[in-house]
Amino acid sequence: MELRRLDPDDPRPRFSCGDPELDEFYAVDSVVGSRELLSVTYAFQDGHGDVAAFFCVSNDAIKKELLPRSSFRRLVRVVPHDKRYSSMPAVKIGRLGVSVASRGAGIGTVVLDYLKTWFTVGNKTGCRFLIVDAYNRPEAVSFYRRNGFEFLTSNDEADSTRIMYFDLITFRL
């Protein structure tokens, strides 16, 4: 597998994960997001140039004022007291898709482990957390839970997505 950054002018190699929204994001919206400096999209390609998985990332934060007090306290309790800011730095996984052909091979977990390593080794952006708005579907939530993500709040239980986070310091240890 080779990781390739997809710049705005790069043609997008064919990809389908079977979810029309994710497929459309990869083919169209990722170009706009990159052009507007809102996100960066990467593709894992096999030796034939086929995309096994893609993900996009952007800078984000977990903001104290947007969460119930108990949720934010639970989140920062592991951070030294003098470093508990009202906005905790995070990297957002905007989209993550695994191709239909690669499904079931553990590629999604490989992508998450790659991201965990990428943002802890050398501390590239000074972020403490990975966050994701996971589809509120059993298979998506279960996937992120198996990979160490936790729910940020219970206020979004009825929403179409759930905000989940991973504390990168736990991966580094």
Image (cartoon, rainbow, N blue to C red):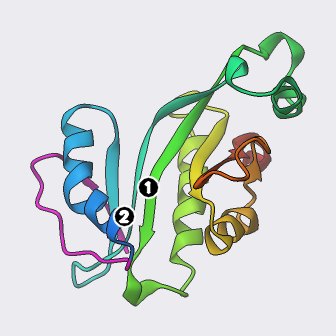
Q: Residue at x 22, y 78 (%)?
A: 49
| Magenta stretch bounds | 1-18
Which type of secondary structure does the marked residue at label 2 adopt?
A: helix
- Residue that mark 1 sits on: 95
As drawn, the residue found furthest toward the top would be 82
Task: Give the answer, above or below, for where 162 lies relative to 147.
Answer: above
Between residues 128 and 99, which one lies in front from this camera angle? 99
Q: Residue at x 33, y 56 (%)?
A: 42
Between residues 36 and 117, which one lies in front from this camera angle? 36
- Judge from the rendering whether residue 16 lies leftward or rightward of residue 83; answer left or right: left
Give the amino acid at mark 2.
Answer: Leu
In this rendering, the count of numbered labels is 2
The local crowd at label 1, few if under 14, some if 14 to 19, many if 20 or more residues have their Cα within 10 Å, is some
Assign the magenta stretch its main secondary structure.
loop
Residue 95, position as x, y percentages in the image: 44, 55
- Residue that mark 2 sits on: 22
Does the segment drawn in magenta span residue 45? no
Residue 52, position as x, y percentages in the image: 37, 77
Q: Is residue 14 visible?
A: yes
Does the segment drawn in magenta span residue 11? yes
Q: CA distance from mark 2 to mark 1?
A: 7 Å
Residue 41, position as x, y percentages in the image: 32, 51
- Judge from the rendering whether residue 113 lies leftward or rightward of residue 36; answer left or right: right
Give the amino acid at mark 1.
Answer: Arg
